[in-house]
Image: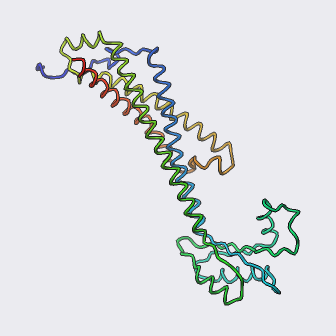
Amino acid sequence: MSEFEIPPPPKGGAGALLPPDAGRDRPLFIVAAILVFLACIAALGARGAWQQSQRWTEDLQTSLTVQVRPVEGGSASEDAQRAADIAAAMDGVANATARDRAHAERLIAPWLGTENIPDDLPLPLIVEIRLEPGIEAPLDALREAFDEAGINASVDDHSRWADAVRGAATRSQTLALALLALLAGAAAAVVAFASRASLAARVDVIDALHLCGAEDRYIAILFQRRFFMLGLKSGAVGAIIAVIVSLLVGTGSQAADASFFLPSWENNPFEFLLLAIAPLLAGATAALSARLAVITDLGRRW
């Protein structure tokens, strides 16, 4: 072996020269596991927001709502049924359903109540139109057909609601990714601090290694391997807890707002893959942070 060649790490790994210290490692392990758990929840939140926005946007883009307003001397229910028949006959329309007055009363009941709606109140009736996937909404054709039939109706393609859903999902994703980056930075800072503390606590061992000819890179590799394993283990614990919590929340509540930021696990292994790489990312972040911190401190020391 030449005098310039760096000797390989000891056979026992980093633990042979840097034995584990449960008193010092346990708090770091807990903090790292919590940070990984929060990072996984943030990543799942971004994924869930994207899934829900895609699902809601697809529903809005494949449906139209027609409001049939009553006219003097006419029957709103008959006009609604005629509008549904006209729409159903058009190309690209999967089905069209005319709703009755009771349906309209249920829609306004949250504002007016069920007992405060006069029987002679002229309510617009709803026609729900479902389009075939990939078909552009025939808005102009519907309006022209309704005008020719003498039906006083307006057509809503839900575009403003689709834009609002996409905007809300984009903001949610941005917030979740920003939180993810913040947690990664916090984890790196914690590991760097712990590495410096570990280096200071073992300064006698480090001095002995340096006097024996060990270079800074060799010493940094010892810390790098040790903190990689610590990050890997704490990352695995944090990811497992994130899976358990997300499954409990997703299956324990049927409300849409309760599970909006959680992805759907059915027949989709992407979320499990996302969480499976979390321990590796945690270990890599810990190893890189430890290496940079140790190299910097050793450079200042010698």
Tell me the quarter of the picture where residue 165 sits. Answer: bottom right
Q: Quadrant of the C terminus?
A: top left
Q: How many marks?
A: 0
Tell me the quarter of the picture where residue 226 sits. Answer: top left
Residue 20 rendering spot, x and y as whole percentages: 40, 16
Q: Considering only vertical position in the picture, is 133 above or below 177?
A: below
At 18% from the left and 22% from the top, the residue drawn is 6
Residue 297 rendering spot, x and y as whole percentages: 28, 21
Q: Quadrant of the N terminus?
A: top left
Identity of the residue furthest to the bottom in this view: 148
Q: Considering only vertical position in the picture, is 141 above or below 179?
A: below
Residue 180 rendering spot, x and y as whole percentages: 46, 41
Q: Nearer the viewer, residue 300 or 261?
A: 300
Q: Nearer the viewer, residue 265 or 263?
A: 263
Q: Is residue 261 left or right of residue 255?
A: left
Q: Is residue 241 left or right of residue 72?
A: left
Residue 51 rendering spot, x and y as whole percentages: 54, 54
At 62% from the left and 75% from the top, the residue drawn is 94
Q: Considering only vertical position in the picture, is 162 above or below 47?
A: below
Q: Is residue 18 left or right of residue 140?
A: left
